[in-house]
Amino acid sequence: MPEISREWWRLRISLKQWAQDALVSFLHENGCNGAEFLDAQPSHLLLAYCRDEPASRSLCQRLWEYSRALGEIHGECPVVGIELERIKDPGWAHAWKAHFRPSRLSRRLAVRPPWSSFDGPEGLRVIQIEPGQAFGTGLHETTRLCMEWLDDLLRDSPIPRTGMDLGTGTGILAMAMALLGVRQVLALDQDPLAVEAALENVRNNNLVETIQVVQGSLDAAGERLFPLVVANLTGTVLMGMARELAKRVCPGGKLLVSGILGEEAKHVAEAFRRAGMRKLGSRRRGEWRAMLLAVRK
Ligand code: SAH
C-alpha cells in the first residue's frame, strides 16, 4: 500500500448522545474518512477526519444544517459545538490504531475493536477487528470503497454463494462478504502475519464455517472460479495480474478492485479490458479509486 496521507483535518464535534448514530451515518455519507467517539461529559465528543480543508469546511457547514433540521424534529439541536483542527503529526496514521473506536463504514457495516461492545442500530453488522500487524481496520479509503460497494452489490438477490478476497489483510472484506450473505469465502494473503491476523479475526467473529483463510496468492485458489472476487491491492499489482485475476471470475461474475491511484486508473482499466473484462463503473474517495468489472460476453 502506498503511504497514507500525513495531513488531515479533524472535526471535534460535541453532541448529544441520542443523535450519535444519525450523525455518524451523516458524516460518512458526506465525505468524512473516519470517525471515532470519545466519552466526554456533559456531551459526547465525536472526532471526524477529513482528507482536505475544503472537504472539512463543507462538512462542518452541512453538519450544522443537519443538526438544525434534527433540532426541528426533536426539539433539541444535537450538535453543541464543532472545532476544526489540522493534524500534522506524521505518526498519526499509526497512532490511531491505539485509539481505534467503532466506526460505521457503510449502510450495513461497521467495525469495532475487541474491547468495544458497540452494537449500533438494528440491522448493522459489526465486524470485530484486532488492530494488529495486518492492514485492514476499514478506516483507509481503499477498504472503505470496497465495503461500500460490497454493501451495494450484496443488497439485492441473488447473492452469490461464493466469493474470494485476494489480499485479505485482517480479513475485513472476507468478513464483510460473509456478513452480507455470501456462504463460502476464500480469503488469501501471501503474508503469513496477515494470515495469522485474519484467522484470529475470523474466529473472533464466529465466521470459521464460512471463511477459509489460506496463505498464498491466486495459485492457492486452485482451479476454482468465483461469482464475486474482491482485490484491494495496488494499481501496479493489479495490472500485473489482470489476466490471472480475470480467469478466476465465472461467467456473469463480478470483480471489485481497489487500491488504485487516480493517475493509474486508466492503465488498470486497460489491463483488464485486454484481459477480457468490461468496466461497469468506478468510484473514488480522495485520491483513491475502486473499479467494478465483469467478464465481457
Ligand atoms: N483486504 C484488506 C487488506 C488490503 S492490504 C483491506 O481491504 O483493508 C493488501 C493485502 O494484500 C496485504 O495484506 C498484502 O500482504 C496482500 N497482498 C499483496 N499482494 C498480494 C498477492 N499477490 N497475493 C496475495 N496477497 C497479496
Image: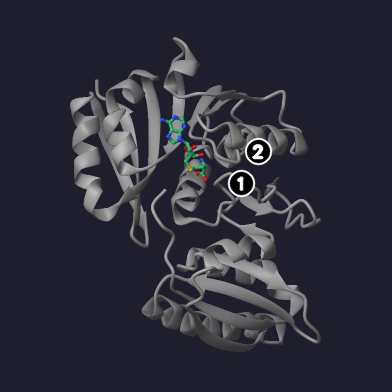
Lateral position of residue 113 relative to residue 117, left or right: left
Q: Tell me where residue 123 appears, x and y as whole percent.
A: 70, 48
* Contact (Cβ within 8 Å) of mark 1 with mark 2: yes
Query: Mark 2 belongs to which amino acid?
Result: Ala
Q: Nearer the viewer, residue 117 or 214?
A: 214
Mark earlier in primary sequence (1, 2): 1
Determine which of the numbered discs, if any, sits on residue 193 in the image: none
Q: Which residue is mark 1?
A: 133
Query: Mark 1 belongs to which amino acid?
Result: Gln
Lateral position of residue 13 relative to residue 2, left or right: right
Q: Which residue is mark 2?
A: 197
Which residue is drawn at the image coordinates 45% and 34% (left, top)? 230
Q: Tell me where residue 140 appears, x and y as whole percent.
A: 50, 56
Q: Quadrant of residue 100?
A: bottom right
Q: Tell me where residue 4 appears, x and y as whole percent.
A: 44, 60
Which residue is drawn at the image coordinates 45% and 56% (left, top)? 141
Quadrant of the image containing the C terminus? top left
Q: Is mark 2 within 8 Å of ligand 1?
A: no
Label 1 secondary element: loop
For disc 1, the neighbor class at 10 Å (few under 14, some 14 to 19, many from 20) is few
For disc 2, the neighbor class at 10 Å (few under 14, some 14 to 19, many from 20) is many
Q: Tell me where residue 53 appears, x and y as whole percent.
A: 40, 80
